[in-house]
Each structure stands twice: as structure tokens, then as C-alpha cells.
């Protein structure tokens, strides 16, 4: 991966050259690569994000849950869609990439198909990127905000956004004309069994098509999968990955903590858009 990076200097926006230990631009701005392999490209003033991202404990919960393979069907469908819609060789950006689970799945699928792939993942949480960089050493990972990505205009053929903040104007900026935007949102009954435990009156998610200016729909692919969590720790890991972790009343949390087994269904809709030419 050494050589010209997909990332740009967050200070002066010039191209960055990656070596074993640093990223460096032509104006001699230097960014160290961490022991785990990610780089911090958060610009001054970007730290007060509206989305502080996963803390250490949440990062571990997410990594442990995804390692269980329960969301494998989503990774498989994302890979299928990338194979279907990406041009031959492709630059892939995952905005809000978390532990790189989906980034790595798409990267591997395209690579195994014989394509030259460059991939970069960004997340605001350095704790989660430690796992990402370990999981996928062939992918560049940087701490950065989705609202101000250290990437050149029109550098990406594919942009993935999976359960993470929607920064549409930035996504449009970094995608090439004709580039593909893959956007994952929860389906109608996503984790409904969990909500039934947490809330007295659980609600279903709204499902709708949302046209975005500058993008045109290619397809919407639903993914539905059921699995069983067989320990309190597994249930807690899933709970920590959800937004409900922040807004569940105490009684609901206590009902969930008492559980040792949970049959649950995950539903996603993958919206695929093309950036208008
Ligand atoms: Zn620079």
C-alpha cells in the first residue's frame, strides 16, 4: 500500500504519500501511522463532531458481535451489489466504516473477481479503527469526519455508508460522476424482538424511497436474516451497537439484562444510487 494514498492532507489538501510509518504531503505535513496501522487525519476543529463515535467498550462490543457472523448475509449482499455495479477496477470509500467488517467484505469480493481495488475506510472513533486496521491490512483507514473527508473531489467509484451519518454533499463531492453510492438503512422490523423487550410500545421503522438530489436510484435490495443469541454477553453486545443503548428506560434495560437467549431478526434495505453525470 505504500505510495500515493487515496487520502489527502487534511491541512493543505495535497496528495499524501504513504510509507511504512507515515503519511506525508508535498508541504511536509506528516501524519504517523499507528502501531495497529491506521492514521489520524482529523483536522483541527473537526473533533467536536456531532457524532463522537464508539468508545472503547462499544468498539469491543461491535467487534465481538460482528465476529460471530450474524450479519454475514448483509456483508454478502453488499459484496454482490458492489460486484454488480462497480466499474472494473475501483476505488472504494467506506464512510463511517467502523471495524471495517463490510469494507473488507467488499474489498475481498472485488479483489477475488480479479479487479484492481483500492479501498479506504474512515471513522471518527480511533478505538474501532484499531480493529479495522488489524482485520484488513490491505485497506487504508483514517480517523476522520464523514462531514469533512480527507479525500479529493471525484476520487471514488464506490462509496459505502452503513448505519452511519449521512453526509450527502461530501459523498457527492468525493464520488466520480457515475459513481455508486451504497446506503444501508434498517428495515421495517429490524431487531424488533429486541425492541419488544426494551420498550412497552415498540415501533416499526418506516420504509421509504428517498430521492436525493444529484443521485438516481439503481435498486433497493432487502436483506433479512434470523439468528439466536445464546448468552447475556452476546445480547449485551448487540444492544451496545444500537441507538437504543442511549435511550432505553431503566426497566427495559433490566428486562434485557435478565435474558440469556434471544431469537432475533435483522432486516436491512440496501439503497444503491448512481451519482448523476
Ligand atoms: Zn499538507
Image (cartoon, rainbow, N blue to C red):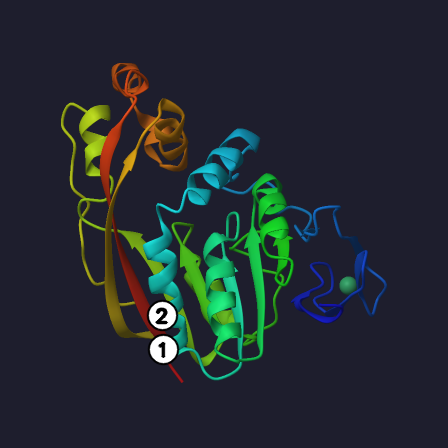
Height in image: 248 above or below 163? above
Viewer-nearest residue: 137 or 118: 137
Residue shown at the point (36%, 78%) measured from the top left? 84
Pointers 1 and 2 in contact (C-beta within 8 Å): yes
Ligand 1 location (quadrant): bottom right
SS for tag 2? helix
Q: Position of residue 182 (x, y in %)?
A: 38, 65
Q: For the residue carrying disc 1, how many other residues have a C-alpha within 10 Å: few (<14), some (14-19), or many (20+)? A: few
Q: Position of residue 277 (x, y in %)?
A: 40, 85
Q: Nearer the viewer, residue 179 or 101?
A: 101
Residue on which disc 1 sits: 84
Residue 62 rendering spot, x and y as whole percentages: 46, 39
Q: CA distance from mark 1 to mark 2?
A: 6 Å
13 lies left or right of 238: right
Please name the residue that numbered disc 2 is placed on.
Answer: 80
Residue at horizontal 22 percent and vertical 31 percent from the top: 195
Q: Position of residue 246 (x, y in %)?
A: 38, 28
Query: Residue 277: in sight, yes or no?
Result: yes
Amino acid at each position: 500500500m505504500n505510495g500515493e494514498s487515496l487520502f489527502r492532507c487534511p491541512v493543505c489538501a495535497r496528495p499524501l504519500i504513504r510509507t511504512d510509518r507515515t503519511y506525508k504531503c508535498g508541504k511536509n505535513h506528516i501524519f504517523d501511522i499507528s502501531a495497529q496501522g491506521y492514521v489520524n487525519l482529523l483536522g483541527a476543529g473537526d473533533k467536536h463532531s456531532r457524532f463522537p463515535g464508539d468508545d472503547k467498550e462499544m468498539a469491543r462490543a461491535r467487534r465481538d458481535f460482528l465476529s460471530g457472523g450474524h450479519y454475514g448475509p448483509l456483508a454478502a449482499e453488499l459484496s454482490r451489489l458492489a460486484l454488480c455495479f462497480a466499474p472494473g477496477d475501483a476505488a472504494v470509500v467506506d464512510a463511517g466504516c467502523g471495524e471495517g467488517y463490510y469494507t473488507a467484505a467488499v474489498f475481498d469480493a472485488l479483489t477475488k473477481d480479479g479487479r484492481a481495488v483500492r479501498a479506504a475506510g474512515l471513522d471518527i472513533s480511533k478505538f474501532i479503527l484499531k480493529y479495522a486496521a488489524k482485520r484488513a491490512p490491505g485497506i487504508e483507514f483514517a480517523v476522520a469526519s464523514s462531514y469533512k473527508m480527507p479525500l479529493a473531489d471525484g476520487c471514488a467509484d464506490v462509496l459505502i455508508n452503513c448505519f452511519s451519518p449521512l453526509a450527502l454533499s461530501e459523498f457527492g463531492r468525493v464520488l466520480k460522476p457515475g459513481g455508486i453510492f451504497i446506503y444501508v438503512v434498517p428495515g421495517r422490523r429490524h431487531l424488533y424482538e429486541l425492541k419488544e423487550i426494551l420498550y412497552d410500545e415498540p415501533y416499526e421503522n418506516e420504509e421509504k424511497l428517498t430521492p436525493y438530489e444529484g443521485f438516481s436510484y439503481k435498486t433497493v435490495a432487502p436483506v433479512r436474516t434470523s439468528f439466536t443469541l445464546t448468552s447475556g454477553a452476546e445480547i449485551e453486545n448487540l444492544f451496545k451497537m444500537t441507538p437504543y443503548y442511549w435511550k432505553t428506560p431503566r426497566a427495559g434495560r433490566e428486562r434485557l439484562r435478565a435474558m440469556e437467549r434471544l431469537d432475533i431478526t435483522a432486516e436491512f434495505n440496501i439503497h444503491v444510487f448512481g451519482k448523476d453525470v
